[in-house]
Structure formats: structure tokens, C-alpha cells
Amino acid sequence: MITPDQLYAAIDGTWPAAQFVTTGPWKLRDGQGGGKRVSAASTDDMVTPEDIQTAVEGLAGFGQAPLFMVKPDQSALDAQLAMLGYEVIDPCNAYAAPVEAMLDTPVPRVTILPHWEPLAIAREIWAEAGIGPARVEVMKRVKGPKVTLLGRHKDKPAGVAHVGIHENIAMLHALEILPHQRRQGMGQWFMRVAAIWARDNGADVLTVICTKANDGANALYTSLGMQAVGGYHYRYLPYEKDRT
């Protein structure tokens, strides 16, 4: 469906760091407070302990604590970081489906409102879930098509999500449903409207990422027929102050 390289390019394209800097074998991300996904170092090459220190120093130049994204086929890197005291945090699954496969069920009218830029109520829902202004700035940095999806249930705000497109791949981020509006089927409507919007804006694949610990999200995406297409985890130093 999509290759690992396409997946990771879509992550960076639809949830971009403030800047990407290549240092030695590393891609370093300047997150400016936007969270782990935009603040980690990653590589596709074999590295030495000296290379790891280069990444640490580069991230420190952004005012960030050491943080590494490790992909499933990077057992050697994973072992090196473990030996240096880096611990695993936030193992994630990535899912994908052809956009057309998500269009088989009509969405009830006025359930999801696509718009850009995010309305105040969308920002408020995100803020309640810990997705503050720095992450909204990440959304604004998307160079391709982008949209905010605002959900409603029984004439009340229900949730919010962000979708961006990189090349032919749409990726949904920051899906948050208000606690009192959960278990109402809103998750599937967000995904189906994301697919409609993606089709209308030139994408033919819809992707999403969630932590392995998020049982509800993993169940939602698999119930919609989305296929696992990869993932990653981070490694960090637990004694370092988190500056990301």
C-alpha cells in the first residue's frame, strides 16, 4: 500500500518540524515545543556512539533534550541507545487504507465540519487535551493541503482533528473527542470525512498513527479495515529534563 519511506515522509510532511537539519547521518528536528514527533533525531544509517553524541549536541542547540525515533528495522540503533541508558517511550502503530475503501458508508449531515484555520472552539478542545498553541503552529506549517475537522453530536461540539496531505498520502493527526461525547461513533465519522476530504484534495491513501497503548484508537482503525503499515518508538534519557 505504502512503503516505509513514504510513511515517514508523510509524517514529516503533514506534521512538520520548524526546521530539519542534516548533521552527519542524522535528520534533526527543531520542534519549538510541538512534541516528540517534531523534536526527535532519526537516521536510516548505521551509527557509532560518536554519531549519537553528535545528535545529542545538535538537539541541544535547539534547546531540546536527547530524543531518538527508532524504526522497526533498527535493532542495532535500538541496542546502542539502550546500552547508553535511553529508555523506550510511546511505541506507535501506523495504519493506512485506500481512500476509496473509507467511502462506503454515508456520513450523517452536519456531523463533521471541515474548515481552515482552526475555529476557537477547535483550539479549545485541543487545549483541554494538552494540544496547545505550539502544536497548532505545527499544523500551520504544513505546506500541502490541510484542514481542521470539527465534530458535532446532538448539536454540541464533540471533537476535533487535523488532516494534512503530502504527495498522495493524507494523514490524520490530533484526533480528540470530548469525554462526554465518546462511545457515540464519532471516531469513524472523523475518519470517513477525512477520507472524503483527502479524495477531494488529491490523496488516494489515508494514514494515521497512534500509540500501541491506546486500545480504543487501535480498535477503531482496525475496525475500519485499515492495515498496519509500520510504526516506531522513541528513546529518551529519563534523567534529562524534558525540553521538547
Image (spheres, rainbow, N blue to C red):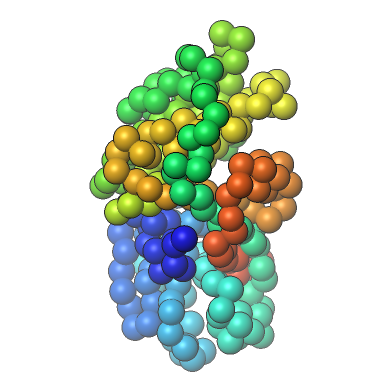
Can you name the residue that lies furthest to the front here?
104
Which percent across, then down, holds residue 25? Answer: 37, 82
Q: Quadrant of residue 133?
A: top left
Which percent across, then down, holds residue 67? Answer: 52, 67
Q: Quadrant of residue 198?
A: top left
Q: As displayed, is residue 217 above or below residue 64?
A: above
- What residue sits 50% from the left and 43% below the top? 101
Q: How many marks?
A: 0
Q: As displayed, is residue 151 above or below residue 137?
A: above
Q: Is residue 121 left or right of residue 83?
A: left
Residue 86 in sight: yes
Residue 18 in sight: no
> For this rendering, which residue is in front, 29 or 238?
29
- What residue sits 72% from the left and 27% below the top? 183
Which percent across, then down, holds residue 187? Answer: 60, 32
Q: As displayed, is residue 59 above or below residue 211?
A: below
Q: Quadrant of residue 202?
A: top left
Q: Is residue 208 left or right of residue 136?
A: right
Which percent across, then down, holds residue 136? Answer: 41, 38
> For this rendering, which residue is in front, 44 or 228?
228
Can you name the residue that lies furthest to the left here?
143
> For this rendering, which residue is in front, 164 or 244?
164
> For this rendering, which residue is in front, 108 or 71?
108
Q: As displayed, is residue 168 above or below residue 42?
A: above
- What residue sits 31% from the left and 69% below the top? 21
Q: Is residue 100 left or right of residue 144?
A: right
Can you name the residue that lies furthest to the top here?
155
